[in-house]
Image: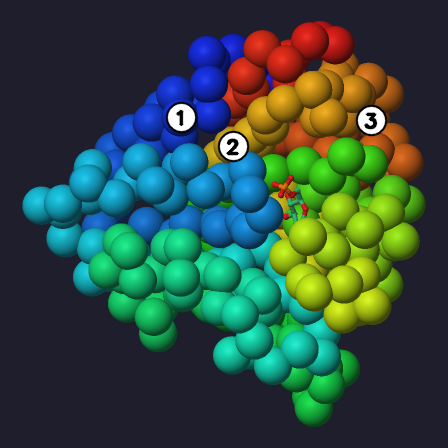
């Protein structure tokens, strides 16, 4: 059963989760963080800035959930660039220790297995930050994704391309494909922290936390995990 924490604001959620991450790094200096992109985790990364001053972060490791396929890693909206800009640089992490799936066309057929092997070699993810899409997707595991799935190439749904068009000049520039950790990969992390803010996420949150466990709502996979913390504002909690 997930622990649900309802907070006043996204800022309060960021502070709460950042405190947990700082505790983890103090206990385990080479902690492995699971990093999500999208707007939801930004308050966590912002709250970490400052809280981590004085903490040695040189050993911290991290794995991003997903990446677009076929955009250059230096493109400002590649998830490699986003993680570098929002997490690695402001927090002073070692860029070589923070990994993103390789979305280059060249070698894409083994990029998923390579990423799984790297996570395994790191000893698994200690704390996985998760956002949730309006259709209940986590990472880029769209409705219908297997709960046993591992890192692999997927086709983005039209809805997700539409949701993410705000980061690009037009929807036509949003890539068609992505490489994402699978639901099975995510479920192997030791602690899942799912964040959601705003009314637009209320249905996805309610179905993920309280609805039937079903591949139709990929976020409902979190109900299969024994250590889940759901941190939401009142609007996102409004259908619970
Ligand atoms: C994107 C990402 C997800 C993210 C979700 C929600 O498609 N791949 O990891 O959780 O959409 O995005 P946001 O947090 O901006 O609402």
Residue in view at x 53 percent, y 58 percent = 64
Disc 2 element: strand
In which quadrant will I find the N terminus?
Answer: top right
Residue in view at x 37 percent, y 43 percent = 45
Q: How is the image coloured?
A: rainbow
Give above or below for 28 relative to 169: above
Q: Is residue 111 visible?
A: no
Give above or below for 95 relative to 63: below
Decide if ligand 1 comes within 8 Å of the CB at mark 2: no
Q: CA distance from mark 1 to mark 3?
A: 30 Å
Q: Which residue is mark 2?
A: 193
> Mark 3 and mark 1 in contact (Cβ < 8 Å)?
no
Q: CA distance from mark 2 to mark 3?
A: 18 Å
Q: Earlier in the sequence, mark 1 or mark 3?
A: 1
Ligand 1 is found in the corner quadrant, namely top right
Is 226 displayed left or right of 113 in the figure?
left
Looking at the image, the residue that sits furthest to the bottom is 106
Decide if ligand 1 comes within 8 Å of the CB at mark 1: no
Task: Name the spot of residue 237 as percent of width and height, x first.
Answer: 64, 13
Disc 1 element: helix
The image quarter containing residue 187 is: top right
Is 219 displayed left or right of 14 in the figure?
right
Task: Name the spot of residue 21 as percent of width and height, x first.
Answer: 32, 37
The image quarter containing residue 220 is: top right
Report the mark closest to the observer, 1 or 2: 1
* Count of picture labels: 3
Q: Which mark is residue 11?
A: 1
Q: Earlier in the sequence, mark 1 or mark 2?
A: 1
Disc 3 element: loop
Q: Earlier in the sequence, mark 2 or mark 3?
A: 2
Q: Which residue is mark 3?
A: 213
Residue in view at x 63 percent, y 14 percent = 235
């Amino acid at each position: 059963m997930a622990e649900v924490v309802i907070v006043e604001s996204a800022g309060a959620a960021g502070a709460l989760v950042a405190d947990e991450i700082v505790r983890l790094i103090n206990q385990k200096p080479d902690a492995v963080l699971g990093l999500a992109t999208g707007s939801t985790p930004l308050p966590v990364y912002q709250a970490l800035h400052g809280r981590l001053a004085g903490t040695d972060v040189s050993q911290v490791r991290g794995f991003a959930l997903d990446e677009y396929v076929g955009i250059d890693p230096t493109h400002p909206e590649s998830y490699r660039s986003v993680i570098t800009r929002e997490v690695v640089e402001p927090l002073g992490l070692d860029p070589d220790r923070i990994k993103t799936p390789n979305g280059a066309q060249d070698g894409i057929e083994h990029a998923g297995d390579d990423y799984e092997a790297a996570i395994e070699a790191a000893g698994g993810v200690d704390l996985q930050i998760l956002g949730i899409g309006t259709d209940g997707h986590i990472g880029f595991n769209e409705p219908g994704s297997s709960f046993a799935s591992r890192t692999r190439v997927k086709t983005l749904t039209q809805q997700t391309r539409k949701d993410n068009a705000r980061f690009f000049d037009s929807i036509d520039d949003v890539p068609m494909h992505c490489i994402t950790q699978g639901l099975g990969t995510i479920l192997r992390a030791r602690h899942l922290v799912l964040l959601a803010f705003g009314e637009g996420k209320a249905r996805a949150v309610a179905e993920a936390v309280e609805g039937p466990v079903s591949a139709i709502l990929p976020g409902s996979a979190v109900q299969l995990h024994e250590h889940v913390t759901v941190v939401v504002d009142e609007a996102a909690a409004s259908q619970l």
